[in-house]
Image (cartoon, rainbow, N blue to C red):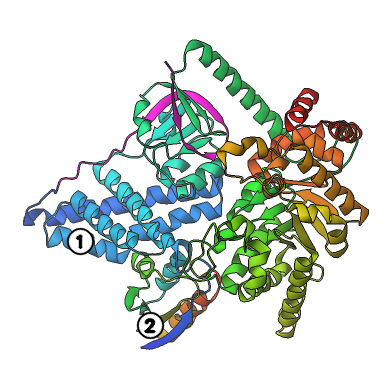
């Protein structure tokens, strides 16, 4: 398992469109991916769980990837959250 | 006897037609139980409904992209993901398999539980997503029950759609040729439905409340979404008048639409720039659609209010960049933060003031809260490479404020360059003329800035010393009052004497009677709500600038706002 902390750059946080982008990226990877914020955990492949984190812009989240291709998956997801689109 | 209802205008315009009442076609909330032997069949029903709902949402998404744009289509993209969300699907399956609920009850409960979880979140952005989950629920239930959405073909040619609320997918299926207006009991002006109705351009009133029940199916309904009023079953006399108004509105709309790509220019060839006022980056599209040649006022307050902490530099950068690139190569004038004690901001500890409109607000606040100001300026300057940025400082009263703001801007620019950021070479810096002090010292200010923009709402309030919200003082809130006009005229003359452009971004810029007078004074730019632009352009294009200049000379002799208004109306 690999993990990394990342700060959300999108101005509205992990909100509808950014959350959708995150989920669409996550489902492409075979490994399990989860996002933790403020004591809550979300499956990155579930938009409802990602939205329920309520993580706003400038907040720090931690991403965990576990399974086949985990290193690549983690790097892609972290880069997405760090970009303004994610 | 005609009845009248009040609502909040979302998309201005007029509509006359027969009421079509859209009722929810959802099943009553009963818990439907099944026997263990039926589990397989209910699971299959559910899976089929998910597949069917996906296909219909995909269609709606594609239609939204065509009719309204990619930004709007993203709403449905997110709903599609919700529909296929593994945690939602698991929950429904569990409710069918373990709790022995039927597919309909299981779907309803699972969606509603998820919606409740989202609406409990503190951030209003996230809480609003609960509405999306409920839309997904409605799609699923309709598929499970075999009652699809009402199709656009179900409306007659002259319909006024009346509903409690509309899902975004309902809006996308509306045909603006048939549905002449929409009237909703609920609804926030920033909801998905509101944004889509604006994008499609159907005159809309929201927030009518329980009064909506007074509209019966098939009633003749006149919707005035300019002033926010609905007239139900008018008497014959009124009906004739309303029909005439609606006809005139339709004709004018066609005439105005034909002007969209023509320049703002008087009959004798004087160029007048017509720009849009916006309050969020998404609205840039509406301004372009209305024929705006740029943005004369981008209010940035929405970034700062309704939140617990100040927006970060990157968050602001993304918004400014979006507006600048949408409008490029046209100019976008962004006004720095313009708030005061009347709209408290939780993360700023402002001293309570007896009269916040005369207190620490706008540039005064920014010069005191320099960290906040510098962050906004950093974001603006970093965004400058994505389009044609102009920066405007609000509520300047004395030249020291302008100098200090410019000094901070300069130091932020140096700081960014030292950090290796690119910043556009020439970024015009303007002063918003909204205090009498600024108008009177326009000759000094003009020597130290690149443009003026006159904000009439505050200029009137401060000139006549009358609160702009006071109902008892309407006679002092008239922008056509002689002293206000003199200050405007003088500001333009002084600006031109020192070679800078003068524009207006207050409400007055969009008043058809006032435009000839302002052109006569020499106003270079008019910035207004996008919906007002077509009308303003037609006024400008039918104007002779030389005659307009004479008009101003004549109006100068008149002593009251009423005389001036009568004179202007007579000469239109």
For this view, does A32 lie left or right of residue B310? Answer: left
Q: Label 2: which residue?
A: A65
* Quadrant assignment, res B446: bottom right
Q: Residue at x 10, y 53 (%)?
A: B38
Q: Can you tell which mark lies on residue B93?
A: 1
Q: Residue at x 83, y 50 (%)?
A: B491
Q: Is residue B16 magenta?
A: yes
Q: Are marks 2 and 1 in contact (CB under 8 Å)?
A: no
When the figure is inspected, residue B140 is found, relative to residue B26, above or below; the finding is below
Instruction: Give the residue at the far front of this rendering.
Output: B354
Q: Residue at x 47, y 34 (%)?
A: B182
Question: Foreground: B145 or B488?
Answer: B488
Q: Is residue B330 magenta?
A: no
**In the image, residue B58 lies at what x, y percent?**
43, 51
Same-subunit check for callouts 2 and 1: no
* Quadrant assignment, res B532: top right
Total marks shown come to: 2
Question: Foreground: A19 or B531?
Answer: B531
In the picture, which quadrant includes the N terminus of chain B?
top left
> Which region is colored magenta?
B2-30
- How much space separates mark 2 and mark 1, taking CA atoms? 26 Å
**In the image, residue B379 lies at what x, y percent?**
65, 71
Q: Chain of mark 1?
A: B
Mark yes or no: residue B266 visible: yes
In the picture, which quadrant includes the C terminus of chain B?
top right
Q: Residue at x 56, y 73 (%)?
A: B312
When the figure is inspected, residue B468 is found, relative to residue B348, above or below; the finding is above
Mark yes or no: residue B84 visible: no
């Amino acid at each position: 398992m690999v993990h990394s902390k990342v700060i959300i750059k999108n101005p509205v946080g992990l909100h509808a469109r950014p959350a959708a982008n995150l989920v669409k990226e996550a489902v492409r990877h075979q490994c399990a991916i989860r996002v933790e914020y403020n004591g809550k955990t979300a499956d990155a492949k579930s938009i409802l769980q990602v939205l329920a984190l309520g993580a706003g812009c400038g907040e720090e989240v931690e991403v965990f990837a576990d399974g086949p291709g985990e290193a690549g998956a983690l790097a892609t997801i972290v880069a997405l959250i760090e970009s303004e689109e994610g | 006897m005609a009845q009248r209802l009040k609502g909040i205008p979302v998309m201005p315009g007029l509509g006359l037609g027969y009421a079509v009442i859209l009722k929810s076609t959802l099943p009553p909330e009963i818990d439907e139980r099944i026997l263990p032997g039926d589990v397989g069949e209910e699971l299959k029903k559910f899976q089929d409904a998910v597949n069917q709902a996906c296909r219909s949402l995909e269609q709606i998404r594609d239609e939204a992209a065509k009719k309204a744009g990619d930004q709007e289509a993203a709403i449905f993209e997110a709903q599609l993901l919700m529909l296929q969300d593994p945690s939602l699907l698991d929950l429904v399956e569990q409710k069918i398999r373990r709790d022995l609920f039927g597919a309909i009850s299981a779907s309803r409960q699972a969606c509603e539980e998820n919606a409740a979880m989202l609406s409990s979140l503190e951030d209003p952005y996230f809480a609003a997503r609960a509405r999306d989950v409920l839309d997904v629920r409605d799609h699923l239930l309709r598929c499970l029950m075999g009652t699809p959405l009402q199709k656009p073909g179900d409306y007659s040619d002259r319909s006024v759609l009346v509903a409690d609320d509309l899902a975004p997918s309902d809006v996308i299926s509306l045909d603006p040729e048939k549905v002449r207006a929409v009237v909703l009991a609920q609804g926030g002006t920033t909801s998905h439905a509101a944004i889509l109705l604006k994008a499609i351009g159907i005159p809309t009133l929201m927030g009518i409340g329980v009064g909506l029940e007074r509209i019966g199916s098939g009633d003749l309904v006149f919707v005035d979404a300019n002033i926010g009023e609905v007239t139900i079953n008018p008497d014959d006399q009124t009906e004739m008048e309303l029909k005439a108004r609606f006809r005139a509105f339709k004709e004018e709309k066609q005439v105005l639409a034909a002007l969209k790509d023509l320049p703002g220019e008087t009959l004798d060839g004087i160029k007048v720039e017509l720009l849009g006022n916006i309050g969020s980056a998404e609205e840039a599209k509406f301004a372009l659609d209305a024929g705006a040649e740029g943005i004369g006022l981008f209010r940035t307050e929405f970034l700062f209010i309704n939140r617990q902490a100040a927006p970060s530099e990157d968050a602001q950068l993304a918004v400014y960049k979006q507006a600048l690139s949408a409008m490029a190569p046209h100019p976008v004038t962004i006004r720095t933060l313009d708030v005061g004690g009347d709209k408290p901001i939780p993360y700023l500890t402002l001293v309570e003031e007896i009269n916040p409109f005369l207190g620490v607000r706008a540039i005064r606040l920014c010069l005191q809260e320099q960290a906040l100001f510098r962050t906004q300026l950093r974001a603006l300057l970093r965004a400058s490479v994505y389009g044609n940025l102009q920066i405007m400082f609000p509520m300047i009263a004395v030249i020291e404020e302008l100098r200090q703001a410019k000094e901070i801007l300069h130091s932020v620019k140096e700081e960014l360059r030292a950090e290796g950021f690119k910043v556009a070479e020439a970024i015009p810096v303007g002063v918003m003329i909204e205090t009498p002090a600024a108008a009177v010292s326009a000759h000094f200010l003009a020597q130290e800035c690149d443009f003026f923009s006159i904000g009439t709402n505050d200029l009137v309030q401060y000139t006549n010393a009358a609160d702009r919200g006071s109902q008892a003082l309407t006679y002092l809130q008239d922008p056509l009052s002689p002293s206000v006009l003199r200050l405007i005229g003088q500001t333009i003359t002084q600006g031109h004497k020192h070679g800078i452009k003068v524009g207006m971004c207050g409400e007055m810029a969009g008043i058809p009677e006032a435009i000839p007078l302002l052109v006569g004074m020499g106003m270079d730019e008019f910035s207004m709500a996008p919906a007002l632009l077509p009308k303003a352009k037609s006024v400008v294009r039918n104007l002779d600038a030389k005659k307009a200049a004479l008009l101003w000379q004549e109006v100068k002799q008149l002593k009251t706002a009423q005389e001036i208004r009568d004179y202007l109306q007579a000469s239109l």
